[in-house]
Image: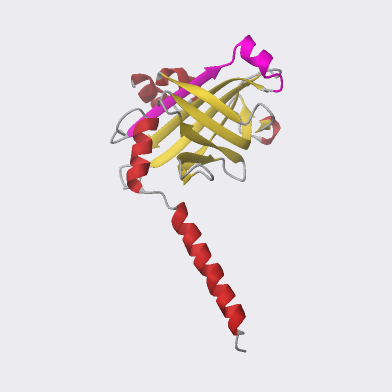
Amino acid sequence: MRMPLGVAFAVLAILAGAEAGLAQEEVDKTRAAAFDKRLFAGALSPKTTYACFVRSYDAEHLAKHPKQKVAAMKLLVTAEHPPDEKVTNYSFRLGVKYRHRPGNFDSSGSCSHVIAENTDGEIRLGCGVDCDGGGIEAAVSKDDKSAVLRLESIRIWQNNKPDDDAEHSLVAGADDKIFRLDRTDTKECASLVTDRKELAALRRK
């Protein structure tokens, strides 16, 4: 059965719009490399490069943000070049201490460059947790000294135990949507690493 001409044009318009949308989502390699240089404070290593960002909120800040659940946060971003691959693999590890809940919580996942919506094409690192575990977006402050982390929801575990019994989620509330974490020595993120070889490599940075 022949498709009516008006419907055909409508379908073509939709397809063209979809292709245009996809083109807008592509991240220019030069801009992505410039973002990496800012995020990792220099050129990437041929093997593995780390960036560590940390923030512990003092009593004054928490008093001004009574609905904030997070008392401290660490973010470790890794760029790795596997020997047999030509692409760079990005990943993250997140450490969280709550204001009114004891214990250490953490999460991890893979990342890729994304174009942030409604920000004039700002590049960020979009990171996700497997099995629909939510994720984060990480941008870099204008002075390159901080990471600006945004989230809606992210699955976390207590004390590096990724099992159902220890699983929780950090859900964005009034004061838990955006976090500014300060760049620091990678050794400060050592608590997020469990692999001994990787931990040794991180401490040598």
Establish if 128 lies above or below 61.
below
| Above or below, comparing residue 102 to residue 136 in the picture | above
**Identity of the residue drawn at 61% across and 79% down:** 7
From this view, report whether residue 56 is shown above or below residue 27: above
- Asked whether residue 30 appears in the rendered view, the answer is yes
List x then y, in percent, for residue 69.
Answer: 68, 23
Q: Toward the viewer: 110 or 21?
A: 21
Q: Is residue 194 visible?
A: no
> Quarter holding the C terminus?
top left
- The location of residue 3, given as percent across then percent down, is 60, 84
Membership of 54 in magenta stretch: yes
Which segment is the magenta one? 48-67
Nearer to us in this view, 161 or 13: 13
Q: Please check the rendered image and state whether residue 130 is part of the magenta-colored stretch, yes or no.
A: no
Q: Position of residue 58 (x, y in %)?
A: 60, 11
In the rendered image, the vertical position of residue 174 relative to residue 72, given as above or below: below
**Image x and y of residue 195, in percent:** 45, 28
116 left or right, relative to 204: right
- Horizontal placement of 44 versus 98: left or right? left
Which quadrant holds the N terminus? bottom right
Q: Nearer the viewer, residue 120 or 125?
A: 120
| Applied colour scheme | secondary structure
Q: Residue shown at 57%/74% (left/top)? A: 11
Side of 186 relative to 67 (left or right)? left
